[in-house]
Structure formats: C-alpha cells, structure tokens
Image (cartoon, grey):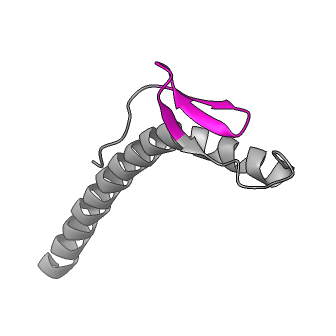
Amino acid sequence: MNKFTKGKWIANGYVVESEDGKTIADCGFSDKGVDEEEKANVRVIGMIPDMVVMIDELSSELHALIIEVNLHRSRVINSQTET
C-alpha cells in the first residue's frame, strides 16, 4: 500500500489539512481568490483516504471472487471430463 498521511483529511477553503493541521494540498491557484473549481478540487483531494480504504476493500472482494470462480470452474471441468 502506498504511504500517505494517515487519518481524516479536512477540506478547509482551498487547503486540505490532516487532523493535526498539517497541510496536505494547497489548491488556491487563482489570483481572483478561491473559485468553485478549486473548492471542488479540495473536496476531492480530501476524500482520498476514504477512497483508498474503499479500493482496498474492493480489491480484496474481487480477489476472493476470482478464487471462488476459479474453484467453480475447476469443479465443472473435472465433472465434465470424468463422464
């Protein structure tokens, strides 16, 4: 698994911070202040820890399903070849 700042990330204006106040990302690039696109970028970046957890869970589920399908296939192939 990739290393990243653990814990909840908080979207705060145009900055994403860790729970302990460490800046994760600064998305305030425009000269006119924070626009809606920058705010949206901050919200998406702030969701990364939750996305990593979901991807890990989905990956585990997919791996388990692949094993189950392969076991089923081997049983079907064996029973068909025996008759």
Task: Report whether 65 appears left or right of 17.
Answer: left
Residue drawn at x 30%, y 49% as measured from the top left: 2
* Residue 81 versus residue 39 in the image, above or below: below
In which quarter of the view is residue 70 placed? bottom left
Q: Residue 63 location, x and y as percent?
A: 30, 55
Tell which of 55 and 1 is nearer to you.
Answer: 1
| Residue farthest to the left, as pictured | 82
Q: Residue 36 location, x and y as percent?
A: 85, 49
Number of dots carrying numbers = 0
Residue drawn at x 70%, y 48% as measured from the top left: 28
Stretch in magenta: 8-24
Tell which of 13 and 45 is nearer to you.
Answer: 13
Task: Report whether 50 appears left or right of 30.
Answer: left
Q: Residue 10 location, x and y as percent?
A: 60, 28
In which quarter of the view is residue 56 placed? top left
Task: Report whether 17 appears left or right of 28.
Answer: left
* Residue 77 versus residue 49 in the image, above or below: below
Magenta span includes 17: yes
Q: Residue 11 location, x and y as percent?
A: 66, 32
* Residue 73 versus residue 45 in the image, above or below: below
Residue drawn at x 87%, y 51% as measured from the top left: 32
| Residue farthest to the top, as pictured | 20
* Residue 42 versus residue 78 in the image, above or below: above
